[in-house]
Structure formats: C-alpha cells, structure tokens
Amino acid sequence: MHNQTPEREIPVLDDGWWASVLEEEENRVVEPSAKVQKTGEAAKVAPDWERASALYRQDEIIELKVTGHNRGGLLVEGEGLSGFVPCSHLMDLPFQVEDERREECFSAYDNRTLRLKVIECVPEEGRMVFSERAARAEAGKRPALFNAIQVGQRLCGEVTNVTEFGVFVDLGGAEGLIHISELSWGRVTHPGQICKVGQHIEVLVMEVTPERCRIALSLKRLTPNPWETVQVRYQVNTIVPAVITALVQFGAFARLEEGLEGLIHASEIPLPSGKAIKDVLEPGQQVQVRILQVEATRQRIGLSLKIN
C-alpha cells in the first residue's frame, strides 16, 4: 500500500548524506591498488561498461564467479565484467559478523558462482557494484519500482539486513536504506535495537536516486518529533516516570517516552556507601525522576533521581 504524506516536509539529502550513510561499505570498494585476498591468478579483465550499463538498465540477473574479497565484501568477475559485492548485499552472510569470523565467512565464498544484479554502474569512477539480494527479485522489477515510488510515500517492506550504520528494507524489487539517524527520534546505539531481519515495517520515502539504485527511507518521520514540543510537556522541577535504558560511566540514560531520553548524571544518583551505579540501577527499571533542564534545540534533558 502506497500512501503519500505531502503535509510533512521531507529533508533534502545531498551527496554528503549518502557518503556518510554508505561510508562503511563504499570505502571498502576495492581500487586497483588496494590489498585484497585473491583465490587465484584471475585474468585482468577490461570491464565491458556498455554491457554493464545495459544489464543495469534492464535489471537483468547475471552469474559471476567470486575471485577474492576484502573486509567489505567480495570481488566477482566473468563475461567481461568485474566488480564488488558489498557484504550487506550477500544472502548467506550473517547480518552481524565479528571481525575474527569475517575472514572465515568470506573465504567460504571462494570460487563460488553467484546470481547477481548490477546495482551501480559508474564508468567515470570505475565503479561496478553487484547485489545478490537484489537478484532475489525477478528481472525488470527495479525499474518498475523506481518509476512508481515518490518522495513522501509510505511503503511497507521486509527488513533484509541490519548493519552498524542502518537497516536495509526490501520494497518488492529494490532495497532501501534507513540510516541509523532515521530510525528513532531518540538515541540508538545499534540499529538492531529497533529492527530485526525478517520484520515487516512501514517506512517513509525520503529520497529516490534511480541512477545510483538508492532509496533513502525513514522510520522516525512516520511519527511527530517529540523534541518539538518537549518544553511544553516537561517543565523543570516536575517529577515524572521514566525507564532506565542504559548505564554509562558518568551516569544513566532514562526514557521518558518513545524518542525522548534524558541523562541522569552520576552526581544526581543517590548511592549507598560503597555502592556503584550498577548496584542500584539496571536497564528496564522503572523510576521516578525530576526534570533539571530541557534543551530542545540540543535534544538534551537533564534528570535527577533526587526527587525529595
């Protein structure tokens, strides 16, 4: 179901936003001088950019052989093509791979043949990027989807991957990305706190870039920004209920409502003699807190457990 929400302003995303969103993977796309793990002496292939562009435009599926890898993904070659498959676009790679297991997981792909789609083809940058996940959808699905969706629409999709920088969502022929900053109005330490692989969610389309096969999505913008009215709803020196969400060296974070968290500084936590913060507080614990300060523009709320 596609619902458009024109009444809500959608922020314009520039190239800098996308660069930061995909920095983890884009910085790992192998350049000729980069150090990579090779599975053998692969022949030097002069990429057939004309064919790659045609495959991209027609959204066709192709089979290529894995010839090597680096920390960010796999190198693939075949039929006059050579490029990179980012780890988030691999079907069988666990969505959270510890560094010590990354090499083992990638090595399991050595010499395998993968069904792929071209998701980026930029000859002037020497960039050819493939996706195994995109190949799940039949050929021709992506162009139809890109022609149909618009900025401001609400779409339903399935979470296909969760990474440190965001969540990938299958929209029925192409994947969109919810950057970690667009998951919640509140503090998110890891996207896995918000979304799980296989989960079906509703998202808001923020940007559509067909030439780069990119769809920027948001989860938090489906709901009003609680920081816009926080100073009206939370007055200094009032006592309100909260839930402890995290313990840190300098205190604890507590959630007042969805998207609104405040900091209880260590100096505002009464501790019995010889006790540490972890001895009196734990995540999920319900407490009463006093509002010390509210800074809406900086999205900060100061709290105290000293309520008497």
Image (cartoon, rainbow, N blue to C red):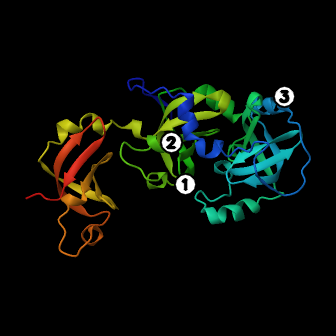
Quick check: 8 above or below 159? above
Disc 2 from disc 3: Cα separation: 32 Å
Few, some or many C-alpha atoms within 10 Å of disc 2 (few <14, some 14-19, many ≥20)?
A: many
Please name the amino acid that badge 1 sits on. Val
Residue located farthest toward the left when viewing the structure as drawn: 308
**The residue tagged with tag 3: helix, strand or loop?**
helix
Q: Which residue is mark 3?
A: 50
Q: Earlier in the sequence, mark 2 or mark 3?
A: 3
Left or right: 6 in relation to 92: left
Judge by depth and name the residue closer to the eye, 285 or 224: 285
Question: Where residue 201 sits: x, y (%)?
Answer: 48, 45
Question: Where residue 37 sits: x, y (%)?
Answer: 78, 56
Q: Earlier in the sequence, mark 2 or mark 1?
A: 2
Please name the amino acid that badge 3 sits on. Glu
Q: Residue at 56% of width from left, 34% of height from top? A: 18
Question: Where residue 157 sits: x, y (%)?
Answer: 54, 43
Question: What label does residue 197 carry, if any?
Answer: 1
Few, some or many C-alpha atoms within 10 Å of disc 3 (few <14, some 14-19, many ≥20)?
A: few
In the image, which is nearer the foreground, mark 1 or mark 3?
3
Q: Earlier in the sequence, mark 1 or mark 3?
A: 3
Q: Which residue is mark 2?
A: 179
Please name the amino acid that badge 2 sits on. His
Disc 1 from disc 3: Cα separation: 36 Å
Question: Where residue 292 sits: x, y (%)?
Answer: 17, 48
Q: Residue at 24% of width from left, 70% of height from top? A: 280
Quick check: 13 above or below 275? above
